[in-house]
Amino acid sequence: MVEIKNLSFGYGKKKLFTNLNVQLEPGNIYGLLGKNGVGKTTLLKLISGLRYPQDGECQVLNYIPQKRLPGLLEEIYFIPEEFFVPPMTIKNYAQIYAPFYPRFNHKAFAEYLEEFNLNLKEKLTELSYGQKKKFLLAFGISTGCSLFILDEPTNGLDIPSKSQFRKILASALTDDRVILVSTHQVRDMENLIDPIIILDDGQIIFNQYIHDVSKHLIIQMDQDLPVTDDVLYSAKVLGGYVVVKENRSSEESRIDLETLFNAVTTNRDRINDLFLRGV
Amino acid sequence: MRAQGKKRNEYFNPGRFFLLFKRDFFTNYRTIIMTVATIAGFVIFASAVSSLKQNQGDFHLKLYFMLLYIGGFIVTSRTFKELHNSQKSYTYVTLPGSLLEKFAERLISSSIGFALGALLVYFISAVISESINHLLFGYSHALFNPLSRIFLIGVAAFVVIQSVFLAGSVFFKKNSFIKTILMLTILAIVLSVIAVLIARFVFWESFAGLQPTKQEFNSLRELSDWLGMTEAGLQLVGHSLWLGIRIFFWALLAPLCWIISYLKFRKIEV
């Protein structure tokens, strides 16, 4: 659905991406992880046509996003981290904006609003930041878009809302839809995002399904710092060491995304080599 | 893929075009109400004050054009403000509508749309204000004919000059009204300097250094003799120059500004 080939982009003289390649297939909730300033939001903007590549190709559903054709825009819904809502009620918003999306599902929209305890008569500008986000989430899913993009979606959500968010996002995934989530809050996204994409140094340095990660890596707690050659990453934590090792057994461990991210960003070559070798 | 099944025109669809108008109207209804109230209040107040000094036959025509030009240029300068706002631009750019539809919608709203809207509000306000004037002062100004030649030319000139402010609203991220005025001022200065330099080269004999001498041309014949041209030839040059200026203003300026604005509009990244 999304195909990026040899894409280069930068702001002024600062190069952000050089020959970046990635493919996103329908039926997945991709988690886009990366340090501050690596270009996660910029990549989302390039995919949705808000920014234009300086070199290379970016295609979404066989469209070139920078042409901003309505046929593609009907298929994309982007919730940025910082957003604007107009001064009108939820009902009016739906009346004005929903007709732009031919597959908008009003019944589903009403159900999502109910799930999030939002009322059609509520004025958008009078909602809290978290409520506005939940409203946009409900609207975005209801558009029937094929590509749903969320930038830091759990920022500003309270604990119950995060659970609701995960539940609704999981239910919104269909075979012909890609959900792309950029986040720092990996704990909020555990058991939801799969595959994991890690962006670093202008490249996609990691793009794997959780299942494959569990097959290749094992994350465990050790009392002492292990010194064996299968250790890929270790960090001191309360009560010992969290260790990422090559999975040389057939057992699969639970994957902690934060530890995985740290392991990949500190030892990317060895980890990628492990996946390439198919060990 | 679902998107490939779409049969709607990707560049212009009347349904989507209408939706863009509807969206803009309902999103900006507070600004529209404030503008309407300002126009109505100003017309009633100015008309009442003006009634004290009677016999102003074209009072309403002058006032309408003053409001149309000043208000219209300010409103036009804000046309693409949404595109330069980091939060609002996401919604606008990703809204399913083609670039052509989005641009044309804003162009029509801020030019003909504003002129017609202002005319409607103005007329209603003028009728109310003149009824009040008649009751209070026993005098009322005559209303103008919106189908008269002078009115239609004035509105057409507004649409042409407005295109420059529309370009300003696309190109300038902030304070586009002031920046457009500044640009026009700089352009006027540059053109004046060019005109002076041309005059300096053509009439070089009449200059001592940069100062013109006291040579005067009291007739077309004197000037044509001095330039070594026939009187008819000089008239032809003058007419051609004036015709060129008129063609540029009435036929080229607005389309040129629209095209430049659209090309820039297409390229804006947010």
Image: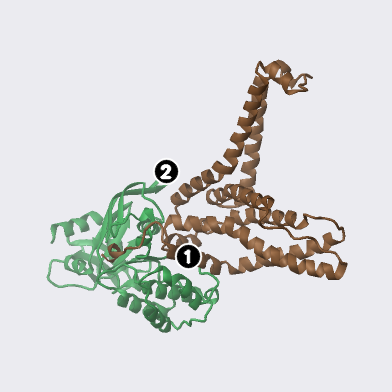
Q: Quadrant of residue A103?
A: bottom left
Q: Is residue B64 above or below residue B186?
A: below
* Residue type for callout 1: Phe
Q: Nearer the viewer, residue A63 or A254?
A: A63
Q: Which chain is brown?
A: B
Residue annotated with mark 1: B18
Say which quarter of the image contains residue A178: bottom left
Mark 2 surroundings: few (<14), some (14-19) or many (≥20) residues within 10 A: few
**Residue B10 at what x, y percent from top left?**
37, 58
User: Do we see residue B208 in this rendering?
Assistant: no
- Tag 2 residue: A13
Point out the image quarter for the N terminus of chain A. bottom left
Q: In front here: B208 or A166?
A: B208
Q: Do badges 2 and 1 share one subunit?
A: no
Residue in the image at 47% along x and 76% along y: A131
The chain in green: A
Mark 2 against mark 1, which lies toward the viewer?
Answer: 1
Callouts 2 and 1 close, C-beta under 8 Å? no
